Amino acid sequence: MKRSLQEIADAIGARLLGDSSRELSGVAEAAQATAQDLIFVEDARHLAGALESRAGAIICGDFAAGAATGKPLLVVRHPKLGFARAAAFLIAKESCDPGIHASAVVHPSAQLGRNVSVQAHAVVAEGVAIGDGARIGPGTILGRNVRIGRDCNLVARVTVYPGACLGDRVTVHAGVVLGGDGFGFVRDPETGRYEKFPQIGTLLIGDDVEIGCNSTIDRGALGATVIGRGVKIDNLVQIAHNCQIGEDVVIAAQTGISGSCVIEDGAIIAGQVGIADHCRIEKGVILGAQSGVPSNKVVRGAGVLFWGTPARPIKGYLKELAILARLARKN
C-alpha cells in the first residue's frame, strides 16, 4: 500500500521537510533501498551515506534538519522508534479470512468472537473463548477453558494447556508451549524416589505480549504464573512455574528462569542468562549476557548493568578480571 509522506509524517508525529506528496510503499536498510522505500539514520555520522542512498525519504533527528539535500526528511526525536512506527503504518499485516478451516476441530461449546480465523488442523477444546479478530494458526491446540483475547495471533503449532489466559494483542510464534507442567518433584527420603508435586495452577499473560519461537512458560504449581503487559520474550526462553514477570520486561534468547522468581517492571535480561529459584530482579535492572543469579538472590539497581556469575555490577566485574590478568602475567 502506498502512503504519501504527509500521511506518514502525521502517523508518527514527524516534522516533514521536502515534498509532502511523494508516495512510498515500504521500508529498507540504506544499501538495499529503492525510491519507494523509507530508511532511517540515528546520528550525524551515518547521514552522508543515507543521503547518497536511493531511498525515497529518510527518518532522522534534528541533526539532519539543516542538510542540503533534495531528499525528503522526516525529523523525529527518536529516529529508530519513528522508523518502527512508520514500518507498522506502511506494511500491512498478514491477512487471513475469518472462519473455521474444514480440517480444524472446534468443540461446540467454544465461544468465538467476530472475525476469528481458525486455520488448518487447529484444535479448539471444550469451553475455550476466543476474542474478536484473533487468529489461531495452523496446527495450534487450545486446551479446555483457555481464554484468548482480542486480536491475538497464534502463528502456528502453538500449544496452550487448559485454563491458560491470554490478554489482547498477544503474539505467540511457532512452537511455543504455554501453561505446561512445572518441574516440581518431592523426594521420598526413605526410598530416594521422586514423586510429582501438583501442577494444577494457571498461566496469565497480559496485553501486548510477544513470545518468540519455541519458548515455554509453565503454569503455576498451585497458584498462577503471571506475564505482565508489554513483555517481550525472544526465542528459546524457559520461564518456570510461579514466576511473576512485571510490565515491559525484555528477555533475550536461551534465558532460563527457575521457579518462583520475580522480575520487576522494565528489567532487561540478555541472552543465555540463568536465574535460579526464588530470586528477585528489581525494577530496571539489566542482566548482561550469560550472567548467573544464585537462588534467593535479590538484584537491585535501576539502570545498572550486572554481569558474570554470580552477577555483580559490571565495573566491579571488569576490575576483578583486570586483577586476575595481572596475576596471571606475574606467574
Image: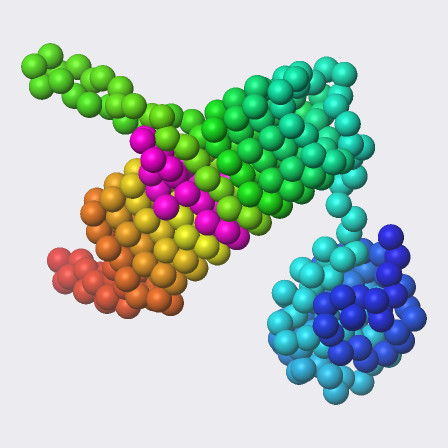
Predominant secondary structure, magenta span:
loop
User: Going by the image, does 111 lie left or right of 269?
Assistant: right
State the image coordinates of residue 180 (x, y, percent, origin top left): 42, 27
**Residue nearest the viewer, comparing 168 with 277:** 168
State the image coordinates of residue 301 (x, y, percent, origin top left): 30, 66
Residue 212 showing in the rendered view: no
Q: What stretch is highlighted in magenta?
A: 220-244
**Residue nearest the viewer, comparing 99 with 21:** 99
Q: Is residue 149 above or below residue 39?
A: above
User: Going by the image, does 229 lie left or right of 3?
Assistant: left
Residue 208 showing in the rendered view: yes
State the image coordinates of residue 129 (x, y, percent, origin top left): 60, 30
State the image coordinates of residue 103 (x, y, percent, origin top left): 72, 15
Q: In this view, does 213 lie above or below 297?
A: above
User: Going by the image, does 298 lie left or right of 270?
Assistant: left
Residue occupying the far bottom of the picture: 66
**Residue nearest the viewer, comparing 288 with 120:** 120
Colour scheme of the rendered structure: rainbow
The residue sitting at 71% across, 39% down in the picture is 133
The residue sitting at 20% across, 17% down in the picture is 194
Q: In which quarter of the image is residue 23?
A: bottom right
The residue sitting at 73% across, 84% down in the picture is 65
**Residue nearest the viewer, comparing 174 with 66:** 174
Residue occupying the far top of the picture: 191
- Is 45 magenta? The answer is no
